[in-house]
Structure formats: structure tokens, C-alpha cells
Amino acid sequence: MQQDNTENHSPDHPIVWIVDDDASIRWVLNESLEDRPYQVRSFDSAFEALRLLPTERPTVVISDVRMPGMDGLEFMEAIHEHDKDIPVIIMTAHADLDTAVKSFQSRAFEYLPKPFEIDDALMIIDRAVKRQLSGGKRVRKVKQTKQPLNIIGSAPAMQEVFRILGRVSQLDVTVLITGETGTGKELVARALYELSSRSNRPFVAINTAAIPRDLLESELFGHEKGAFTGAHTQRVGRFEEANGGTLFLDEIGDMPVDLQTRLLRVLNDGTFYRVGGKTPIKTDVRIVAATHQNMQELVKQGRFREDLLYRLNVIRIKVPALRERREDILPIVRYYLTEEAKSYGLEEKRLSKAVEKYLVELPWPGNVRQIRSLCTWLTIMAPDKTVHMEDLPLELQNGSEPLAMSAGGASASEDSDDWETPLRSWAKHFLNAGRTELHTEAEKIFEKALIEVAMKHSMNHRQKAAQLLGWGRNTLTRKTQALGLDD
């Protein structure tokens, strides 16, 4: 079925095609584009759109991925076979790394995970139209990855990680990965490597915080025989080992300042000297760095070179903490329960409903690494196939209280009208843990919940959400930024 709003627009105006089997998405985008000088056509299937392609050239196409008959990636291929310069924006409610990567490798203009903010979608459409009208050309199609990539995440914060990974997968740029300890920064670094054109060359990782300062220089750059006491033979460093491939510098914020200077020189001209050496060595490596620290704060403290940060921070990927993506906790737990069972040759464990609810509400300060350790423990120690509350480690039962528990100990229902009882219980746990600033912390949680509900109710239309909350749009923007909801 085809719909359009062309009656109000000149035939010379840009043509936007919306292709999605979800009528609500077509309607929202159609209505939102009413005020723009575009001719908009809506289709409920890729086949309907392709029938019109011989007689009409769209300026921009925005398409869903999962549709009956022909999916969005196949549709994009068909569009580009007809005209490789038509920008196609890919939407999906089932965002994962594989879809993001395949979208960009198939020359998608942009990747838009659902649910999305209408303002963001309009901005991307406007940008695509502007590029087309200015005569811009699409980048070439790049090779498809063959590696299975086991990064789990359906939360919006992880979808942004996938979008960036897909965008930079074939670009030989330096990347800085940030995130708390245990969030999976090295996994993201390995994904960058596996997706890159350097995937058939070495991946070399070094944790700069784990190597003593007086040995780190030799580890990175190697040394000549006799360079220092104990240097009985020549040694190749990590830069030489990684030549042609990727060098992953973990915990880059802990690198001594004098070595930062040497690293900057390598980034500038691609050459270095071994310790005690006099001959410059040329190297060709892609640098991926990671840190759990606030790099700007380290620069202010004089502990990290600002010019080096600029060279490392070409593309930044922020890996979210688990508390920022609670919908991913159970899929991650299930994945590691399967993997640990395979690793130890034991029966795979299953979680009871009570345990599932409990785990989702834990704070997880150790993030994914803590979950993996728990899954190893449960695989080995839990007596039965199904894991019950009493099977959890004592420190997890007693030391990490869930965020929102009812007075009886069970999780409060999301649909319950009695929100005061779990709030009182949460406040009690908060104070019993010796923490302070109860009102400040509760206010953040309260406002975050209200904003998320209002945004969902308004289908992510920021102006309508602000009206529902009784705020101005600027107030909503300020609060979402302060609460980290815009990350």
C-alpha cells in the first residue's frame, strides 16, 4: 500500500520515501515531515516501493530492516543497483552489532535504532537531502565481515555503540574507548579489529597499568642488546609485533608522561627507536586505546598530555555501565551460563523467575566482568539445573541490595499503583548501606523514570514529552543531559 502527501508540494521538491510495515512509524514520520518542503511517499513493503522506482527517483529513502518478503538490507541493495547514489537510512527495532555493521558495509547513509527521537530522525533526513542536493556521492561498498561478534545489547546506549562500530568498521582511524571497569572495552576493541581491513594481521594488546613503569618502555618499543642491565639479547616490542595490524593500549590514562611523549611521536610520523637503539624503525599500526578514567580531568591535573589526547580521541566510543542498560542483564547472564557450561563440560544452568528479577535490580559495580564471574560460580557450585535464590553466593544475597524492592522482598510490579512502598524500602536499604544525600539520589531516579515514561508515551517526541511533564523543552533538554539520558 502506498500513501503520499505530495498534493501540497511542488514536483520539484525533494522526494522522501518511507518504507516500513509498521503503520504507526509511517504515520509519525509522515506527519512530522508535513512542515518541510518534501514530497513524502509511504510504503508498507519494499516490493511496493520498488515498483515505483523505474518512474520516480527518490531523493532519500528511510527503510525498516525487518519486513515481510524483502528485508531492508536487500531493499537497499536493490535501490543501489538502480542508483548507487541514493542515500538510504536504515531503521530497526532489533538493533544489534551485526545489523549495524551490515548496514554500513552495504552503504547505508545512517543507522537509526528504534525507538528514536523524531527530532533526530528529521535531522538525519534533512542531512541526507542536503547532501543529495549538493551533489554528494556515497562511499564505496566495503567487504563483509566473516567474524561472529558476540557483543550483546539491545539497550539504546549499546545501539549507539553498534552504530559507531558499524560506521568506523572499515576506516583506519584511531579510536578511544571509555567506560567503567568491567564494561567490556577490550571486547569492543577486538570487534573494531575483526571488522577492519587489518583483521588478517596481528591484534596485540597491552595493559599499561599492569606493567611496571621501568619495563613499560621496553615492552612497547623493544630494546637492543646491552641497552640496560639484563638486556642480553635484542627484543622486539609491541609496536613491531603489531606492525600492519592493531595495537590495543588498555588503561592508557596510567601511561607515564615521558612515555606519552614517545607515543605521540609514533602517532605523528610512524617511527620510533628501540631502547638503546640508534636506527629509526617504521611501523604501520592502528591504535585503539581504552580507559576507565576521566581523561579531561587527567589533562587538567597535568597527568596526561592534551595533544596526545587529541590524537587518540579521533573517534570516541563510550561503553555503558550495566546500570544504564538493565534490559541487557539477563541476555548477558544467559550467554555466559551457556559459555561457562561448554567451557567446563557441565550442565547448563537456568535461572528461576525470582533470581531473574533479583539480578536485574542489582547495582553490578563490576559490570559484565562481575556477571561472568557469577556465571562461572553458578555453573560449578549451584547444585541443581535451576538456580534459586538460596543458590546465589552469600555476598550477592547480602552485600548488594536490589534497587527497588517491595517490603516483602519481591520486586515491585511495574504496573503497580503502590509505588510508595518500594520507595520506602529502597530508601531504607540506601540508608542502611551508610550512604548519604538520599533526597538528591531519589530525585534523580524519580525524574529519570518520569522522563523515560513521558518520552515513550509521546513516541520520543521531545516537545510533546515536555508538555506531558509540565516543563518547557529547554528544561527537558537540560535534565536529560544532566541525567545522562542523551548519551
Image: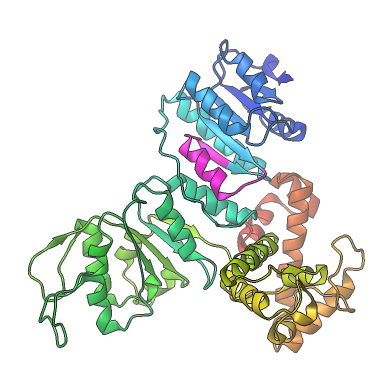
Residue 291 location in percent, x, y? 44, 69
Left or right of 410? Residue 207 is left
Left or right of 59? Residue 249 is left
Where 70 falls versus 343 (above or below)?
above
Range shown magenta: 93-111
Residue 352 location in percent, x, y? 80, 69
Residue extending furthest toward the top: 55
**Residue at position x 39%, y 32% in the image:** 140
**Residue at position x 83%, y 74% in the image:** 423
Left or right of 209? Residue 30 is right
Q: From this viewpoint, is residue 265 visible?
A: yes
> Residue 320 sits in which quadrant?
bottom right
> Residue 346 sits in which quadrant?
bottom right
Q: From this viewpoint, is residue 436 visible?
A: no
Left or right of 172? Residue 268 is left
Q: What is the basis of the colouring in this image?
A: rainbow
Where 245 falls versus 322 (above or below)?
above
Is residue 109 a member of the stretch shown in magenta? yes
Residue 399 location in percent, x, y? 70, 85
Where 429 falls versus 484 (above or below)?
below
